[in-house]
Image (spheres, rainbow, N blue to C red):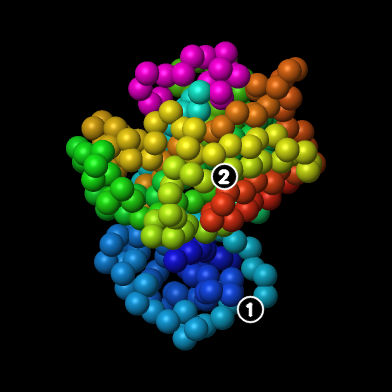
Amino acid sequence: MKLLRYGPAGSERPALLDADGNMRDISQYVDDIDAQTLAPEGLAKLAALNPMDLPLVDGTPRIGSAIARPGKFLCVGLNYADHARETGKEPPAEPVLFSKATTAMCGPYDNVEIPRGSDRTDWEIELGIVIGKRAKYVSEADALDYVAGYALVNDVSERRFQSERGGQWVKGKSHDTFGPVGPWMVTKDEIADVQNIDLWLDVDGERRQTGNTKTMIFGVAHLVHYISQFMTLEAGDIIATGTPPGVGLGMKPPTFLKEGQVVTLGAAGLGEQRQVMVQA
């Protein structure tokens, strides 16, 4: 299934895509695409529905973040060796973890704000893992049993805030709109091999990033296992798994986003996003 949310920001309704790519409202069955819906029982209830019996969503409404605000929005840094090197760092021996504020989440086609005082706003296409049930001290062999599905994430970053303002990376990762998620979450049964997903990102139509999840340093199963050793993961939590090379910070000279530029990105099976940069 492909699950999504549509409508004005703060008033989104849950939906799924039918075989023809049409949105079908599922609000009579679930309140939102949230922890309860993403649990195994919730997904099983939706999978039993006949999409053609569901109300068709008319027009072209705004698409919101694919997941209602989760308990945790976690990120993995430097998870592609080429990306680590382009930023001047060596590939890590263990996953680098940091948090992104859940208030950064927005829809896949919403405008992205350049923060006040920013001169280094950057792009990062990433595969997002969506957790489906409580995971604590899980083994790597069982880790995918705790995954509900996957979604496209743009881990927008302000590099000066991230690296030069002291403390942790969260400062450069958490501005409002720095976390577009979607357009949908695809359940894991529709992804044949999560470690073989093509990723791409363009700025103003010019290709910046091309990658594939097979080149991750730490794969999806390892990340879920590893993170669960340090904290309990819960249904609805999102893990952004790192970005392939081609970010603005790694260009020569470094190149960052300006007001009016358009970022488009996509991943096989996960859909596409489009954001216009605006000044906060």
Comes first in the chain, label 1 or label 2: 1
Dot 1 alpha-carbon crowd within 10 angstroms: few under 14, some 14 to 19, many 20 or more? few
**Disc 1/disc 2 C-alpha distance (Å):** 31 Å
Q: Quadrant of the N terminus?
A: bottom left
Dot 2 alpha-carbon crowd within 10 angstroms: few under 14, some 14 to 19, many 20 or more? some
Badge 2 is on which residue? 198
Q: As shown in the figure, which amino acid type bears the numbered disc 1?
A: Asp
Q: Front-most of 222 and 273?
A: 222
List x then y, in percent, for residue 49. Answer: 39, 79
Secondary structure state at the residue bearing disc 1: loop
In the displayed structure, would residue 22 be above or below residue 256?
below
Secondary structure state at the residue bearing disc 2: strand
Q: Is residue 190 left or right of residue 183?
A: left
Is residue 231 located in the magenta-colored stretch of the structure?
no
List x then y, in percent, for residue 185. Answer: 47, 57
Which stretch appears magenta? 82-99
User: Is residue 98 at least partly visible in the picture?
Assistant: no
Q: Quadrant of the C terminus?
A: top right
Residue at coordinates 24% horizontally, 42% vertically from top-left?
141
List x then y, in percent, for residue 208. Answer: 70, 34
Q: Is residue 9 left or right of residue 186?
A: right
The quarter holding residue 217 reads top left
Badge 1 is on which residue? 58
The quarter holding residue 210 reads top right
Is residue 94 located in the magenta-colored stretch of the structure?
yes
List x then y, in percent, for residue 103. Answer: 50, 44
User: Is residue 25 at least partly visible in the picture?
Assistant: yes
Q: Is residue 243 left or right of residue 265?
A: left
